[in-house]
């Protein structure tokens, strides 16, 4: 960054031989978060994580972030300060400068728009459209925690006053909802030419895999038992019924539906012709299936194959 906040525009220098990556994402109150439930630091962290995860999915390096924040008149300064604290904490984690943005008063609620600029060596960006039949399908980390926790919070917060809700989100749960964008893994895959296609898991495994299939004009077959499901305390966090836990301190896997359709994991899904190590940059990598010539997605479970429909989050559709 040559010139940051203080002028009409920021001035950035793109490394020689690189191309510019640009991504933008909204975080909207009562769509992506709830003020009466989610601590502001968590909302700020996740706002930036959304953009950084997109850069990771292209195998890129983040260069700068721009934040536009609109808040209603009933939003307290304390909330805004907490939001920025979480935002800037993640920015510092990846050495990403906040280079500019805008503030405004909204008619109602809170809207935050994050723009992240990044760069990637010319012609090396990993796209969604490169998957080929025979490629293996991999995911990083474990899936389903965010969706399972959200479902539990929605159920447990019913009947509580708005004032008490955010104060009762346990710290361990907040940590589970604070994703670390997989930038190092994305770069590692791009540098070695190991990913033929890649996408970040923001809308759910089924929906994001469907995006790859559509862009690559292929199908996919995934194995239910191979999907790496997050493990949470057994106190009703959407845990699988077959868990052996007998008390709230034990952990068991989240239900398959959360790992398949939940979203908000911000892990990476990628395809490769190569055998990828089971750990990259200290993060688990799991092969969950393969790309096929036959269009459409199938889920293999207990020796049977069934059609898999995209069941993750999509705007402008009715959500249950």
Image (cartoon, grey):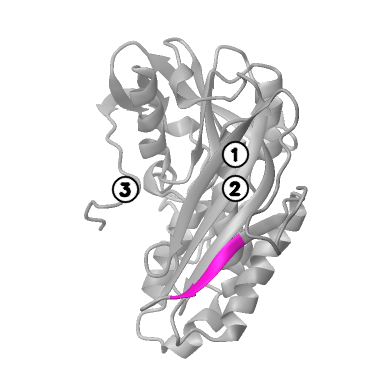
Q: Nearer the viewer, residue 131 or 74?
A: 74
Labels 1 and 3: the sequence-earlier one? 1
Q: Position of residue 83 (x, y in %)?
A: 60, 71
Q: From the viewer's perspective, is 101 left or right of 188?
A: left
Q: Which residue is mark 3?
A: 314
Give coordinates of residue 233: x percent, y percent.
56, 61
Q: Position of residue 205 (x, y in %)?
A: 42, 38
Q: Position of residue 99 (x, y in %)?
A: 68, 56
Side of 185 where 55 appears, left or right: left
100 or 126, nearer to the observer: 100
Magenta highlight: main SS: strand
Quadrant containing the C terminus in the rendered view: bottom left
SS for callout 3: loop
Which residue is identified by label 1?
55
| 175 shown above or below 289 | below
* C-alpha span from label 1 to label 3: 21 Å
- Can see residue 129? yes
Look at the picture and state if 143 lies above or below 17: below
Which mark is first along the chain, 2 or 1? Answer: 1
Q: Which one is in front, 316 or 21? A: 21
Q: Are marks 1 and 2 in contact (CB under 8 Å)?
A: yes
- Inspect the magenta stretch and tell me whether residue 104 lies in it: yes
* Label 2: element kind: strand
212 left or right, relative to 194: left
How far is disc 1 from disc 2 in space, using C-alphas?
Answer: 8 Å
Identify the magenta region: 101-105
């Amino acid at each position: 960054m040559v010139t940051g906040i203080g002028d009409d525009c920021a001035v950035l220098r793109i490394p020689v031989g690189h191309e510019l990556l640009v991504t933008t994402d909204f975080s909207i109150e009562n769509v992506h978060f709830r003020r009466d439930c989610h601590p502001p630091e968590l909302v700020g962290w996740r706002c930036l994580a959304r953009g950084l995860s997109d850069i990771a999915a292209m195998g890129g390096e983040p260069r700068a972030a721009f934040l536009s924040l609109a808040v209603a008149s009933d939003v307290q300064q304390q909330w805004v300060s907490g939001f920025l604290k979480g935002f800037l904490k993640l920015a510092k984690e990846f050495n990403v400068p906040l280079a500019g943005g805008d503030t405004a008063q909204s008619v109602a609620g809170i809207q935050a728009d994050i723009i992240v600029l990044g760069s990637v060596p010319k012609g090396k960006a990993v796209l969604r459209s490169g998957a080929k039949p025979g490629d293996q399908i991999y995911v990083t980390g474990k899936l389903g925690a965010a969706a399972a926790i959200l479902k539990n919070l929605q159920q447990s917060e019913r009947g509580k006053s708005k004032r008490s809700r955010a104060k009762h989100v346990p710290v361990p749960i907040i940590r589970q909802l604070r994703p670390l964008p997989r930038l190092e893994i994305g770069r590692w895959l791009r540098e070695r030419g190991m990913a033929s296609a890649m996408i970040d898991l923001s809308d759910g495994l089924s929906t994001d895999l469907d995006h790859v299939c559509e862009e690559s004009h292929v199908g996919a077959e995934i194995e239910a038992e191979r999907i790496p499901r997050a493990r949470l305390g057994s106190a009703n966090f959407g845990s699988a019924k077959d868990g052996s836990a007998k008390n709230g301190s034990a952990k068991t896997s989240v239900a398959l539906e959360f790992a398949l359709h939940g979203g908000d994991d911000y892990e990476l899904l990628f395809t490769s012709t190569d055998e990828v190590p089971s750990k990259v940059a200290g993060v688990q990598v799991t092969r969950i299936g393969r790309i096929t010539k036959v269009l459409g997605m199938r889920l293999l479970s207990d020796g049977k194959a069934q059609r898999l429909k995209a069941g993750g989050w999509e705007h402008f559709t009715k959500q249950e």
